[in-house]
Amino acid sequence: MNVIQLLGALGAATRQALADWGFGARLFFKLLKMSGAALRRFGLVRDQVHFLGNYSLAIITVSGLFVGFVLGLQGYYTLQRYGSAEALGLLVALSLVRELGPVVAALLYAGRAGASLTAEIGLMRAGEQLTALEMMAVDPVQRILAPRFMGGVIALPLLTAVFSAVGILGGYVVGVLLIGVDAGSFWSQMQGGVDVFKDVGNGIIKSIVFGVAVTFIALLQGYVAKPTPEGVASATTRSVVVSSLSVLGLDFILTAMMFSI
């Protein structure tokens, strides 16, 4: 391959990447524009909250419990070195509401609900159901994608709250019931050290941003999937990978912004 061919291939790849980014941006703003209309048809959004949230509840609850167990063990043995084992409740709560709750819940949501969304929309594309809606003058973005988008944005903060609450309970079981940390110190340190707006509020903001990002990526990958079994499978895999990397990158950006203000 000579230099001219190399430059041509590079230009074609750049042009395609810009076109993909442009299509994704237009779809994102279209979904935001149609969010109000989707909420007016609340039955569709409610069904998606049930599908995405309720069916993800088991993995979120079990994972949160075991994360709390591990935090309780690791936190106790770390704090014990400095004679601060009574601050175990504060350590567990801050770790969960600030970072682990939003991030781990979003990663689990991407693997379970995000993959399901991509496969569902991809199969609609492969079965020409989206094309059939367009032929009937029904906008598939408004009828199919927008309710799922709003359902995901609503479901993930709720799942994050469940994850953090169950994780704190797991830390209590290990730290207080098994190891023997004083229960009063566990809860009082947590109550005095966790700020509702700075800590819990930042965690809620993160979970909303992650919900928007993960749900949009899942819908986009399904919407542009090639209408073949291999295309749907590839889109599902790509959805989980891109969503997971996006969550980690956004977490760094949001944390830097929140703690620099």
Image (cartoon, rainbow, N blue to C red):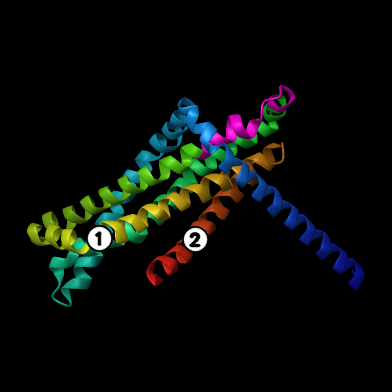
Foreground of the two, 16 or 198: 198
- Displayed quadrant of residue 130: top right
Residue positioned 36% across, 39% down in the render: 57
- Asked if the magenta segment contains residue 135, the reply would be yes
Report which residue position mark 2 lands on.
250
The mark nearer the N terminus, 1 or 2, is 1
Q: Which mark is residue 131?
A: none
> Does 24 sit above or below residue 184?
above
Q: Quadrant of the N terminus?
A: bottom right
Horizontal side of 139 relative to 111 (left or right) equals right
In the rendered view of the protein, which quadrant contains the C terminus? Answer: bottom left
Q: Residue 65 at x, y = what percent?
A: 28, 50
Task: Say above or below: 62 vs 178.
Answer: above
What residue type is disc 1 on? Asp
The answer, for residue 2, to whether it is visible in the render is no
Report which residue position mark 1 lands on.
195
Disc tally is 2
